[in-house]
Structure formats: structure tokens, C-alpha cells
């Protein structure tokens, strides 16, 4: 009730796809599924999803090492009824992130519309492949750091003189500012 001009009731589910490492959960996909929400609510929820995807991208950048920090993305999937938007946020330049809507997903209503779902299904598989690649880069980064810590060099029990370098892009992450509710703006 605080965010919208009038009371809005709607059924929606927030879903996270995560990679669970030994000590952390790394968000890879921000998604929300709603049942026929109104336009104001949809726009607000999509903007929140974009912010969450940006935060996910920043966390992925922080979790990867220098050699694995290429082509990173934070994905979002927003579904309302039987249609949705699928996209990703990319760091294209230091401090500049771009949200790209990759595909408009339309779920089939009946068997006769199943043939039209082929391109949407292909886009969903592309997204899942990319999300798996992000998880794999995080896993490889964690393994590289763990292997470096476990290996014995010339100097035992001393500071590593050649640590695994963090991602070059990690210095380009910025805080995310979420819109306050309307009555607090």
C-alpha cells in the first residue's frame, strides 16, 4: 500500500538462482513471477529486478579472479501471466552498466500455440547456459584461490608474495540505489 497510489493485491513469487559455494551463496539470476499485475506494479517490479541483476553482476565481478572476469552478466527474468521479459545487465565500461532485454517470452496457452514457443524456449536455454557459465567462473575462481592457499612454496607460513589477482573490473562496482516508496520520496 505504501508504494502505489491505491491498494494493489497480486500474487507474485520472487525466485533466485544461486551458486552455493562452500561459504557463500552467489546470486546468478533475479526473477519474479506474477499473476496478472497492473501496469504500475509491473514497471516498479521490473525496475527492482534490474537493480537486483546489477547487484548480482557486481557480486559476480567481486567473486571472480582476473583471468576469468570476461563476459560477465547478471540476468533477470520477469513474468506476468503467460508472458515475460528476459534480459541481462552488463558492465560495458568502467562505471557504466547496460540492461539489455534479450527476448520477450510468451508461454503457450494451448497445444496449437506450442510451435510459437520455440524461440522463447531457445532464449531460456541460452540464459540458463550463461547462468551456468557464471557459476562455473565463480567455482573456478574459488578453486584457484583455495589451491594457491594450500600449495606450499619456498616460504612456509608466510604471506604469499604472488597472490591470485582480483578481477580488474572489481574496482568498477558501485552501490545500487533503490527507489524509496512514494510516501517517503
Image: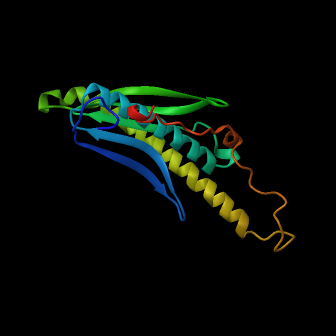
Q: Who's the residue at 29% across and 40% down the image? A: 33
Foreground: 35 or 181? Answer: 181
Position of 58 compared to 75: left or right? right
Q: Who's the residue at 72% across and 66% down the image? A: 149
Foreground: 175 or 128? Answer: 175
Q: Position of residue 117 (x, y in %)?
A: 25, 30
Can I make out residue 126 in this image?
A: no
Q: Who's the residue at 61% across and 44% down the image? A: 61
Position of 10 compared to 181: left or right? left
Q: Position of residue 168 (x, y in %)?
A: 71, 41
Q: Position of residue 65 (x, y in %)?
A: 67, 49
Q: Residue furthest bottom?
A: 157
Residue 36 is drawn in which quadrant? Answer: top left
Q: Who's the residue at 87% across and 70% down the image? A: 154
Q: Residue furthest front?
A: 183
Can I make out residue 40 in this image?
A: yes
Q: Position of residue 126 (x, y in %)?
A: 42, 36
What is the tally of numbered marks visible in this picture?
Answer: 0
Foreground: 182 or 177? Answer: 182
Amino acid at each position: 500500500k505504501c508504494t502505489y497510489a491505491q491498494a494493489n493485491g497480486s500474487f507474485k513469487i520472487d525466485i533466485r538462482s544461486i551458486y552455493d559455494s562452500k561459504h557463500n551463496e552467489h546470486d546468478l539470476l533475479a526473477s519474479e513471477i506474477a499473476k496478472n499485475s497492473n501496469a504500475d506494479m509491473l514497471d516498479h517490479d521490473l525496475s527492482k529486478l534490474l537493480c537486483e541483476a546489477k547487484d548480482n553482476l557486481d557480486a559476480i565481478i567481486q567473486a571472480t579472479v582476473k583471468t576469468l572476469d570476461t563476459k560477465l552478466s547478471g540476468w533477470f527474468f520477469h513474468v506476468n501471466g503467460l508472458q515475460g521479459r528476459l534480459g541481462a545487465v552488463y558492465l560495458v565500461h568502467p562505471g557504466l552498466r547496460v540492461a539489455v532485454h534479450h527476448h520477450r517470452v510468451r508461454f503457450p496457452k494451448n497445444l496449437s500455440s506450442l510451435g510459437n514457443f520455440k524461440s522463447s524456449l531457445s532464449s531460456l536455454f541460452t540464459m540458463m547456459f550463461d547462468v551456468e557459465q557464471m557459476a562455473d567462473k565463480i567455482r573456478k575462481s574459488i578453486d584457484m584461490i583455495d589451491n594457491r592457499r594450500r600449495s606450499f612454496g619456498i616460504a612456509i607460513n608466510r604471506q604469499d608474495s604472488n597472490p591470485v589477482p582480483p578481477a580488474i573490473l572489481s574496482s568498477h562496482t558501485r552501490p545500487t540505489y533503490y527507489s524509496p516508496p512514494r510516501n517517503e520520496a
